[in-house]
Amino acid sequence: MEEVKQADQAYHQEEEKQYSYLNLGPTHPATHGIFQNVLKMDGEIIVDAEPTIGYIHRAFEKLSERRPFNQITPITDRMNYCSAPINNMGWHMTVEKLIQAEIPKRVQYMRVIIMELARITDHLICNAVIGVDTGALTGFVYMFQQRELVYEIYEEICGARLTSNIGRIGGFERDFSPKAWEKIHRFLKEFPKVLKEFENLLERNRIFMDRTIGVGGITGERALEFSFSGPNLRAAGVDYDVRVARPYSSYEDFDFTIPIGTNGDVYDRFMVRQGEMWQSLSIIEQAIKNLPDGPFHGKVPDFYLPPKEEVYNNMEALIYHFKIVMGETDVPKGEVYHCVEGGNGELGFYLISDGGRTPFRLHMRRPCFIYYQAYPEMIKGSMLSDAILTMSSMNVIAGELDA
Amino acid sequence: MEGTGLEKTIGILNQKYEGEVLHAAMLYDFPTITLKKDKIIEIIKFLKEHPDTRYHYLTTLCGIHFPELNQIAVMYQLHNMMSGERVRLKIYLPAEKPEVPTLTTVFAGANWMERETYDFFGVIFTGHPDLRRILNVEDMIMFPLRKEFPLEDQVREDKNDTMFGR
């Protein structure tokens, strides 16, 4: 018996010896954020992986319990910083649902424009980076130039570029200026050409196809088991989009299709995102074409932070500004969940209000957090270089992992 | 679509789990059902497999601390993508010893959500394959999202919270 035990031990020791452990991250250009993967490698094949997150943990949910509703907006846009405005709008709509505010059609359409622009920037960064990870830098440079154009639009609308903080509870601080419209039109004119060029560069490229097809795949059933959503779920063949299934902000008025993949591999995720960018362009054009007239904010004086010019010149506005900033406005008691189709999937805000000036509890459903737990399963048995591609195609953003 | 599922779900639940439902309400557009804690996993599995509900998707899971009740609630949000119906199930656990079986046996995606809830609230999910802290350091002894840990430095005396409505 003892001999058997010794032999068993020796075998396991021997087995352990042939593996090497590799720390991918926490800070590595290929991890696209600050998180670590300890990979157990057999040569260049990944046997097992253990992801560790929490390096940029900023306590979003705890912070939210001490801040009035307006001041939570800047927290939300630090989650997925590639498409920050979607987070902002999602949060505003959550509060609007809680206070049951009516929002003018014009605001809803303006939000759609901003959210779709944000979706485009999110997808273009992701796809450009997939290109980089296969060794194609050209597309990345082309696409980043376009992201710059969108950031100029944000800048024109709210003054910030990356952490946008666009909009207010109830609408926008001001209407889009003529210059902002000009920039939006410029983007709509220039971007399709570049997107097409980018597609031509990679879509049928032999090297790109060989590197991405059949890599990092997940089946539709498994993706649902793991609570996947957004482009990663659709790439696995499941037709689910929050914009269609549970329309918000007038998405029911727009005509668009949802690109679906079949294999759930890196190539499919790339193609789904490409398709979505074309659809987003179409949505923006429809929104501009049918943009209703009307005010750029709803009538929610207790929550809508008045524009600065009004605060300086109008007593009422000054009073409301003061009340809102000092957090004197109580909100109704309630429990509400609102979700939007973020750049990465279903971004949900679960908010409990006890009637005080701050949320009693705010939980954010971050799509990246949910994807990343499936990562070890998706890369097991593949090569190290495939693991990098899988990660970039899942578009894992560290800010969304750590809440 | 939202909201049609409350009465149906309650009816289906009562057929098999009579007396398990403590409270049910339509909160805004979301059916919310509070249940007794003992059979929660069994009930979720039942609702996932029942042909009339088929809540096959776990949207999210989180904890909520109610200091005045001395309880920690665990909230599960389920979704049926075919019919568009959603439901929120809630259970309450004693804050001293919050313990509930793991949902990873039903949904693979519950793994990290439960680790996060453990990390923040100290809820023990029995049978979880890897119940470790996920965002905070491993040797931390407290659970920061509980209400007894206020955000700001309590030693400071230069700030009068009552001035800010806190």
Image (cartoon, rainbow, N blue to C red):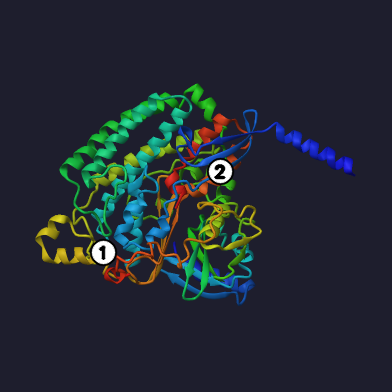
Q: What is the chain letter for disc 1?
A: A
Label total for image: 2
State the residue position of label 1: A303
Residue A318 as seen in the image, left or right of residue B127: left
Q: Position of residue A210 (x, y in %)?
A: 54, 25
Residue A7 visible (yes or no): yes
Q: Amino acid at mark 1?
A: Phe
**Badge 2 element:** strand
- In this rendered view, identify the residue nearer to me: A166 or B17: A166
Residue A304 as seen in the image, left or right of residue A309: right
Residue A251 visible (yes or no): no
Q: Amino acid at mark 2?
A: Pro
Question: What mark, if any, has residue A182 been given in the picture?
Answer: none
State the residue position of label 2: A51
Q: Position of residue B131 (x, y in %)?
A: 61, 55
The relative height of residue A93 versus residue B18 in the rendered view (above or below) is above
